[in-house]
C-alpha cells in the first residue's frame, strides 16, 4: 500500500441543512403527472404513500436550504462526517498527473451511502405516527439501510428484494433480517402484481420496477403503513447532498477544487449527493466543473434512453415522471451491480442532463470489476460493484489527463464497499463474469413506448 491522506471534518461540521438544487435551477424539473387525471401532482397527493414532510420536500422548488432534524443529525454522528481521501496509490499505478480524491461513504454501519436518506425517512414516518414501512431494494444496500434506520426508530419493515439479487447476495438479505426486517424475493406471490408476473413468466428474475410495484401495493393495503424509496425521487437526492456538502469543505482543506466529479448511476441517489452541491456553482456561472454519471452498459438510461414521461414502476402505480428512461417494462440484465439495474433517471438529474450540466458514460461489467480490483490493490478498499463504475470512469479520465499532459483534479464517490459482494468478485477472478450487450432493437422495444 502507498501513503494516503485523509481530510477529516469534526462532528460539529456535519451540515445542519440539505441543499435543494431544484430551487436554483434555471429550468425547473417538469412536474409529476397523475396518469389518470393528467393533472400535476401536489404534495398532498403523496400523503397516502409517503410521510407528509418528504412529500413536501419532493415538490419543493423554492427553498434552497432545508433543515436536517436534530434527531437525524445525531444519528448521522455515528458515521459522519465521512472521510475524503487522496488516492495516491491509484495515481501512482496510473502514472497520471491527475489528483484523484474519493469520498468514502463505505464507512457507514450498512457499508453504503444509503443510510443518509434512510434515517430521515424513518424519522419522519415515526413522528407522524406510522408503525410500518414497505420498500424495495435492488442489490440490498437500500434495504439494509432502511432496516437499520427502522430499527433505530422502532418501526416494522417489509422489503421486496429483486429476486436475482436475493439469490446472488444472501448476506445482504441476512443484514436486513438481523436488523429485524422481513425480506421477500420479488416478484412474489404476496401481491397481485407479483402473482400476475409469475403467472406470465415463472422464470422472471425481477427488476426494481417490479419490486417498487409490490412494495407500493402492500403499503396501500396495510393500515398505518407508509412506503419509502431509496433513489430516483427528489427528496432522496436532497438527503444525499450531505455527501457533497462535506466534500466541498474537505476539498477546501486540500486546497483544491474538482475539475471533474463522478458518481455511479442507477436512479441517481449517490450521484446527486456528490454532485448537486458543486453543480450550483456551474448554475451561477462561477465554475465550469464536469459532472459524469457512470452507468452500466446493460442498463444505459442516460446514454441510450429517451427523455419523456414514464412510470417509475412496472405496474404503473407511480405518477408519470419526466425522466430519461429505457421504458418501465425494460428488463435489465442480471449484472452484479444490482443497485444500478433501474430503467429510469430521477427528474432533477434528467433535467440537468437535458440542459447540458451533466454528461454520462456507460461501463461494461468486466471493465468495472477490473477497475475495482485495481482500486483494491492500490487503496486497500474492496468497492461495491456499483462503485466500480465510478472508479472505471475516474481511471478513464485520469489516463486521458496523462495523454493530454494536463493536471486535473478528479473527485468521485465511493458509494459503498463490496465485502458482502465477494461472490461477484469470485466470478470475475475465475473468469466466469460476462458482459451483456444490448442491441438498439432490444432497447427500442421498451424505450419508445408511451
Image (cartoon, grey):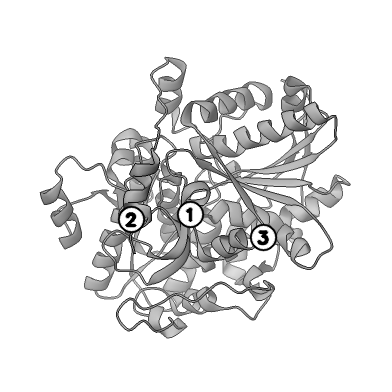
Which residue was labeled with disc 2? 209
First in sequence: mark 3 vs mark 1: 1
126, 266: nearer the viewer: 266
Spot occupied by residue 85 in the image (x, y as percentages of width and height): 74, 38
Report how far apart the C-alphas of labels 3 and 1 lie in the structure: 14 Å
| For residue 153, side relative to residue 200 (left or right) | right
Which residue was labeled with disc 3? 276
Outermost residue toward the front in this view = 441
381, 430: nearer the viewer: 430
On-image quarter of the N terminus? top right
- Residue appearing at x 66%, y 75% in the figure: 23
- Of the numbered discs in the image, which one, if any, rests on residue 444? none
Q: Quadrant of residue 209?
A: bottom left
On-image quarter of the C terminus? bottom left
Label 2 residue SS: helix
Which residue was labeled with disc 1? 267
First in sequence: mark 1 vs mark 2: 2
- Mark 2 residue crowding within 10 angstroms, few (<14) / some (14–19) / many (20+): many
Amino acid at each position: 500500500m502507498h501513503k494516503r491522506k485523509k481530510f477529516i471534518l469534526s462532528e460539529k461540521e456535519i451540515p445542519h441543512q440539505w441543499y435543494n438544487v431544484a430551487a436554483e435551477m434555471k429550468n425547473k424539473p417538469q412536474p409529476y403527472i397523475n396518469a389518470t387525471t393528467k393533472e400535476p401532482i401536489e404534495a398532498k397527493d403523496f400523503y397516502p404513500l409517503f410521510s407528509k414532510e418528504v412529500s413536501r420536500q419532493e415538490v419543493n422548488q423554492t427553498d434552497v436550504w432545508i433543515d436536517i432534524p436534530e434527531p437525524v443529525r445525531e444519528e448521522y454522528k455515528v458515521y459522519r462526517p465521512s472521510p475524503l481521501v487522496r488516492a495516491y496509490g491509484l495515481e501512482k499505478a496510473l502514472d497520471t498527473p491527475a489528483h484523484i480524491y474519493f469520498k468514502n461513504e463505505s464507512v457507514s454501519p450498512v457499508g453504503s451511502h444509503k443510510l443518509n436518506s434512510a434515517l430521515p425517512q424513518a424519522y419522519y414516518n415515526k413522528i407522524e405516527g406510522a408503525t410500518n414501512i414497505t420498500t424495495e431494494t435492488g442489490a440490498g444496500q437500500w434495504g439494509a439501510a432502511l432496516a437499520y434506520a427502522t430499527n433505530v426508530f422502532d418501526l416494522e419493515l417489509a422489503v421486496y428484494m429483486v429476486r436475482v439479487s436475493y439469490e446472488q447476495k444472501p448476506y445482504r438479505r441476512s443484514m436486513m433480517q438481523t436488523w429485524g426486517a422481513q425480506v421477500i424475493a420479488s416478484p412474489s406471490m404476496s401481491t397481485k402484481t407479483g402473482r400476475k408476473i409469475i403467472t406470465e413468466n415463472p422464470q422472471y428474475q425481477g427488476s426494481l420496477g417490479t419490486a417498487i410495484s409490490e412494495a407500493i401495493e402492500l403499503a396501500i393495503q396495510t393500515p398505518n403503513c407508509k412506503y419509502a424509496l431509496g433513489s430516483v425521487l427528489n427528496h432522496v437526492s436532497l438527503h444525499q447532498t450531505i455527501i457533497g456538502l462535506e466534500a466541498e469543505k474537505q476539498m477546501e482543506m486540500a486546497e483544491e477544487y474538482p475539475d471533474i466529479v463522478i458518481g455511479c448511476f442507477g436512479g441517481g441517489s449517490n450521484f446527486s449527493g456528490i454532485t448537486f452541491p458543486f453543480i450550483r456553482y456551474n448554475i451561477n456561472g462561477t465554475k465550469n466543473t464536469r459532472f459524469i454519471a457512470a452507468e452500466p452498459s446493460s442498463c444505459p438510461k442516460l446514454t441510450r434512453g429517451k427523455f419523456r414521461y414514464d412510470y417509475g414502476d412496472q405496474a404503473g402505480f407511480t405518477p408519470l415522471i419526466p425522466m430519461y428512461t429505457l421504458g418501465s417494462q425494460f428488463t435489465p440484465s442480471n449484472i452484479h451491480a444490482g443497485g444500478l439495474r433501474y430503467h429510469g433517471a430521477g427528474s432533477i438529474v434528467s433535467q440537468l442532463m437535458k440542459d447540458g450540466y451533466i454528461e454520462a458514460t456507460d461501463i461494461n461489467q468486466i471493465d468495472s470489476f477490473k477497475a475495482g480490483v485495481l482500486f483494491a490493490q492500490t487503496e486497500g478498499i474492496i468497492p461495491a460493484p456499483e462503485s466500480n463504475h465510478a472508479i472505471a470512469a475516474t481511471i478513464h479520465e485520469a489516463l486521458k489527463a496523462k495523454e493530454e499532459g494536463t493536471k486535473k483534479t478528479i473527485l468521485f464517490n465511493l458509494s459503498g464497499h463490496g465485502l458482502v459482494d465477494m461472490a461477484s468478485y469470485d466470478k470475475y477472478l475465475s473468469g466466469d463474469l460476462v458482459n451483456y450487450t444490448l442491441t438498439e432493437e432490444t432497447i427500442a422495444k421498451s424505450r419508445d413506448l408511451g
